[in-house]
Amino acid sequence: MNFNEINLKPELQKALARHNLTVATEIQEKTIPLALENRDIIGKSQTGTGKTAAFLLPILERLVPNVNFVQAIIVTPTRELALQVLDKVRDLSMYLEGISSAGVTGGANIARQIQSLKRANIVVGTPGRITDLLNRKALKLNQVRTVVLDEADEMLKMGFKQDINNLFASIPEEHQTLLFSATMNKQVNEIANKYLKNPIEVSVERGALSGANIKQYFIDTKTHNKEDALLAIYSNIKPELSIVFANTKSQTEEISSLLYKNGVRSFVINGDKRQSERNRALKAFKTSATKVLVATDVAARGIDVPGIDYVINYDLPHDHEYYIHRIGRTARAGSSGNSISLVGNRNNFFHLKDLEKYQNKEIEQMDVTSWELPIIERRSGGGNSGGFRRGSDNRSGGGRNFSDNRGSSGGSSRNFKPSSDRPFTKSNDFGGGGSFENNGPSKDRRKRDFNTSKPKRSGYAGGKSKTKSNWS
């Protein structure tokens, strides 16, 4: 269905055309007509399916202009997703007059947010900050006509059930509720049964969630270290714009440090970062000031940046839906993309098979037989095949080699200097220009080939090395 077949204001049609949105997605086609009829809706839909426009277009169509009260409130589990939705509100309402919106999230100046609420018709926020503003009587919802719970399952998983109850206690009995969730678990069903009136359920088939335009790969890292594989991706594939996902906040910092030491500039977003830091990181990523973002699942929710060509799972997520969400960061708006998962133990492979069954789609093993990897700069003491390991300069085996029996014979410290021909700020290409500050030039660009025989030496002590490793 084309958007011009839907009864929307000319200003909304103009905004859609401005952003090259002409054909409605499945969730939009199913949701918008029902929402325009003021029906309560349960939308079972993952991110990346166009659900944001599915609930925003009906809200904007029915909004009364030039009034100073809140008519619609949209609740999201994270700050990043709230800001993303707010951006979409402004994109779609750019030709509408007399419409104002406000974002209310934690980690930002609350006084400024209170000021922005005075004229807001649409409020987008996170549960905790909304509760705070309600308690301060700075947010008045007595004339709200539409409530949207976006990613309701995530909000409940994060412990925001009471905040949701507080919200519904503050709005008129007569209102419309649009609830969107990737899964319909017991908690989500309880909320739906409690607050929605005769809802219509719409859903997108799982096959559409994983994206036909995403090529999914894995790299077997059971013999070799994940650090090697990650750096090999950046030196051989050279992604244009990529996100690396890790399962813990501490690991995102360690991955970013590893990339930094090896000529790849990245920014980190995780729950420990201040909102200003997260905003700065997202801005740098959106403008390609940095081409790599290292993130946790929760912090990355809502990221919608065009041009991401690779998503890299340093660890597989524990939840299948998180995997779908992660890879959905690429192949946006009909483009194509790729995902690579680093898989190194038996449980990982079982999990990989489960993911294939879950999405009814094969995850192919990536051919790395022709890949080369520069000697990498890492912390003294090296790491193990499971990821990062805190080392000690005087530990036996601290000089890590790349053979199958690495660590059995000592070696020199792993405190290598990256060569001056490795870039830092301008490119992710290990062979480009630029250098690390305070590191002198190296005489060679030492590399290892991924598909040759086992190494003849146990470690690297400097100078030119012919050591190569086997990834088979």
Image (cartoon, rainbow, N blue to C red):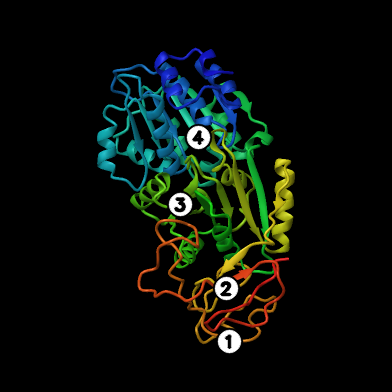
* SS for dot 1: loop
Please say whether residue 38 is visible from this viewpoint.
no
Counting residues from the start of the chain, the first of labels 1 and 2 encountered is 2
Label 3 is placed on what type of residue?
Answer: Lys
Q: What residue is disc 2 on?
A: 383
Mark linked to residue 291? 3
Disc 4 crowd rating (10 Å Cα; few below 14, some 14-19, many 20+) is: many
In-image side of 195 versus 130 (left or right): right
In-image side of 225 versus 100 (left or right): right
Mark linked to residue 396? 1
Quadrant location, the C terminus: bottom right
| Above/below status of 295 relative to 40 | below
Of labels 1 and 3, the one closer to you: 3
Counting residues from the start of the chain, the first of labels 1 and 4 encountered is 4
| Above/below status of 306 relative to 56 | below
How far apart are the alpha carbons under marks 4 and 2? 40 Å
